Amino acid sequence: MYEIRWHGRGGQGAITAAKIAAAAAFASGYAGVVMAPTFGTERRGAPVMTSLKISKTKIYDLSPIETPDIVVVLDHLLLTEVDVKHGLKSGGIIVLNTPMPFESYRFDNFRLATADITAISVE
């Protein structure tokens, strides 16, 4: 099973992105797909999180993810507001949307992938 936790801001598309990934996984033959958004009554721009579990077999545990394999961060500024590494498995992957160069970040015991997705989407 793959466990992916998404971090973003209200209105930024973290929940929509997780829904799209969930639909793609299910269409690709994964029998177990569970998405659980976590947000309160915060206003637009407030931090939000969603959990996505993907498995070849059915998933019966509907609880939020505590030890993700992958963390996707849609806003690099969240790194100063939210502990996005919390619970991430050793050797886990952090996917970070940032305009900063890869060398600007250091995450011990984790693998990092960076891209300026915001700039790409504007083009």
Image (tube, rainbow, N blue to C red):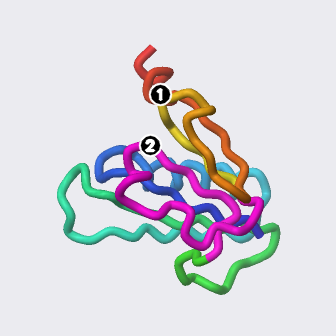
Say which mark, if any, is on residue 99. Answer: 1
Q: Is residue 118 above or below residue 30?
A: above
**Image quarter of the N terminus:** bottom right
Write the residue at 69% across / 53% down: 93
Q: Is residue 31 above or below residue 80?
A: below
Camera-nearest residue between 46 and 17: 46
What percent of the width, then of the height, locates residue 39?
33, 68
Task: Say which element carries label 2.
Answer: helix
Write the residue at 63% across / 52% down: 107
Which stretch appears magenta? 67-92
Q: Earlier in the sequence, mark 2 or mark 1?
A: 2
Q: Is residue 104 above or below residue 30?
A: above
Quick check: 37 left or right of 10? right
Quick check: 90 left or right of 123? right
- Specify the quadrant of the image occupied by residue 4: bottom right
Binning the other alpha carbons within 10 Å of mark 2 as few (below 14), some (14 to 19) or many (20 upward) gives some
Magenta stretch prevailing secondary structure: loop
What percent of the width, then of the height, locates residue 114?
60, 36
Q: Are marks 2 and 1 in contact (CB under 8 Å)?
A: yes
What percent of the width, then of the height, locates residue 48?
36, 60
What percent of the width, then of the height, locates residue 100?
50, 29
Residue at which label 2 appears: 76
- Specify the quadrant of the image occupied by residue 108: bottom right
Q: Residue furthest top?
A: 123
Task: Say which element carries label 1.
Answer: loop
